[in-house]
Structures are given as C-alpha cells and as structure tokens.
Image: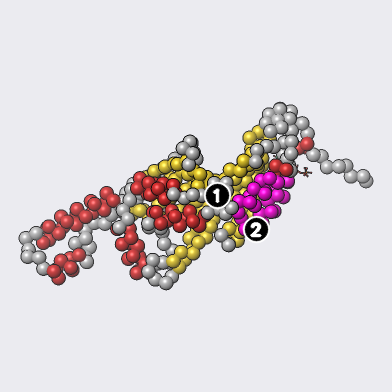
Amino acid sequence: MKLASLPDIAAQASRQAQPLDWVGMCGIALPLRIEGQHVSAKVDAGVSLDDGNARGIHMSRLYLALEWLEGEKLNMPLVRQVLARFLDSHEGLSRRAYLNIHTECLLKRPALISPLAGWKAYPISILASVENDMFHVELKIDVAYSSTCPCSAALARQLIQQQFADDFGSAELDYQSVLEWLGTAEGIVATPHSQRSNAHLHVQLEDFSEEFPMLSLIDQAEAALGTAVQTAVKRADEQAFALANGQNLMFCEDAARRLHQALQSNPALKAFTVKVVHAESLHAHDAVAQSSWSAEGGMAIKSAV
Ligand SMILES: Nc1nc2c(ncn2[C@@H]2O[C@H](COP(=O)(O)OP(=O)(O)OP(=O)(O)O)[C@@H](O)[C@H]2O)c(=O)[nH]1
C-alpha cells in the first residue's frame, strides 16, 4: 500500500488572518551547564507569528534548536545563536524570537566561624529575546537573607532597661551581679523579631556582556544585605549570626535601598528592579519594598509588586 504523505496543518492558511505576539512551548525540560554545574532547567521557546495568514509555527524547529544548549556552557553568545536559529527556521513567519530559561544555581557557602560549608539554591531565570538584530536579555535571581526589625530591637532594649532599673535601681552596682543578670532570660526580658526574607533581583544586562553575571550579582546582593541565610551551622556560627543580625537591623525599606545602591554601581547592568519581601514574624502578612533604576533614565524594568 502506498503511504500518503503526512498532513501538515501548520502549513495551511489561517481562517482568521491575525498575527500573534508569542507562539511556542513552555516548560521544556533541558540539562544545562551554568557556573560549572550541570543543572536541570525548564525552558520556554517562542517566536512571534507575524504572518497572520499562516496557521501555525513549526514547534519542532524551535525544540530542535534547543539541542545547542545541551551540556554547553551557557553564555550570551550561545543564547543569541539559539535565538537566531529560531528566526532562521521561521523565515517569512516571525520577526521576534524568545528564549526563557528557568533553573536553580547551587552555590557552596562557608559557615561564619567553623570550617563547615553547605549548599544554597538560588532560583534563576534568563529572559532573552531578539528583534531586528536587537538582543535583549534580563536576569532574575532570588536571594534569601535574614532581617531583624530595628523597631522591635529598640522596643526590646527599652524593656531590658526597665528591667535593669527594677532589679538594680535601688542597689549599689556590683560587677559580678550585673554580669550574671546579663546572662539570664529574666534580665534580657525581650528579644527583637527576625524573619527570613527574600530579595528578588530583576536586571537587564548590557548586551556587550558575554557571560551571565549570576555569581557576582548574588555576591553583591548578599554583601549589601549583610546577613545571608546560612547553610551548615554549629553554635559558634549561630552566635556569629546573632551578632551579625544585631549589627544589621533593617526595615524592608533599608534592604531595598541598600540593594539599589549596590546594583547601581554594577557596570554590567542597564536597568533593574529590586523587590524585597520580609516574611514578617510579627504579622501574618509580608512587608515589601521595591525600587527601580535605568541607566538611560527612562522606564526601568516593570515588575509588579
Ligand atoms: N503549530 C502548532 N503545532 C503544534 C501544536 N500542538 C502540537 N503541535 C505539533 O507540533 C508538531 C511539530 O510541528 P512542525 O515543526 O510544523 O513539524 P513538521 O512539519 O514535521 O516539521 P517541519 O517539516 O520542519 O515543518 C506537529 O506534529 C504539530 O501538530 C500547536 O498548538 N501549534
């Protein structure tokens, strides 16, 4: 029996002549190499469908172009190459191509005092597109940190002062008694509240960059915030962390300002939006602050609160 050729629906004319902004596939599983690690990623691949009369795009051509990313060191030239392939394989149909990569970067972080270290996962998204040879690339990174409320710390100090006045107000001060009092929960009657917090960085990269500056952005954000969450922890590390938090009191506004200032000095960035979320232990809701900047002074990246 002679086999009929396979029907090709995508090649048919569309019944409704309507161009489309984005057509493609979301959530494609792909192994990638980022910061020297093999990571598992979910990828969105798409093109615009500018020919409104064409029924569909060629999904398989986008899918197959992603093979170029497999096992290769992920950098900007490679992403550009894949985007160019998307467009080459859709000549006459598409003018814009999109590639989004969602993954996690695992970094080994040392403890504050002990010789221990452990892994931290940083969720990362790369959002790249090309149109008329104009390459646009954005990077999203989440960085977890600890924040201690400055207001709560001040209120706790006041309670400790009151307790001190109650316990020692009428007595001759004796060094040993005060020292012992300072080491008791009856003396230090109140503690400020701290919370695990998250900084969401969304940056637009200069197109001259070759590498994705994930590591340097994470390091810069953690240095600016001062109290990154820890991995392996012994008591000595926990004590050092308590001291670091006590010296690093911050509202969400403080955290957003610090990040803004730090990122503004990064020459690899064209624009950014930072959003910090303090998952309050005082409230059942979060305290949130956001700040944006653009080198050109125009619209910074939009990122809804
Ligand atoms: N365009 C489009 N294709 C879809 C969709 N859902 C599934 N597909 C399938 O994706 C498969 C690959 O499409 P194409 O890339 O056009 O496949 P092909 O015609 O064999 O490949 P080429 O010869 O390169 O065009 C087809 O079997 C489509 O049916 C959809 O919503 N839109």
Q: Is residue 196 left or right of residue 94?
A: left
* Residue 118 image point, x, y percent: 47, 66
Foreground residue, 203 or 121? 203
The secondary structure making up most of the magenta span is helix
Residue 128 painted magenta: no
Q: Earlier in the sequence, mark 2 or mark 1?
A: 2
Q: Give the tally of numbered discs.
A: 2
Can I make out residue 303 in this image?
no
Element type where label 2 sits in the image: loop
Which residue is most to the top? 16
Can I make out residue 184 in this image?
yes
* Residue 38 image point, x, y percent: 60, 61
State the separation of the CA atoms marked 2 and 1: 17 Å
Quadrant the C terminus occupies: top left
In the image, which residues are magenta? 60-85
Q: Which residue is mark 1?
A: 125
Query: Which of the colour schemes (rainbow, by chain, secondary structure, one colour) is used?
Result: secondary structure
Q: Residue at x 64, y 52 (%)?
A: 78
Q: Which mark is residue 72?
A: 2
- Quadrant in the rendering for residue 2: top right
* Residue 57 image point, x, y percent: 72, 39
Q: Residue at x 26, y 53 (%)?
A: 153
Q: Residue at x 46, y 43 (%)?
A: 273
Q: Is residue 125 left or right of residue 153?
A: right
Q: Which mark is residue 152?
A: none
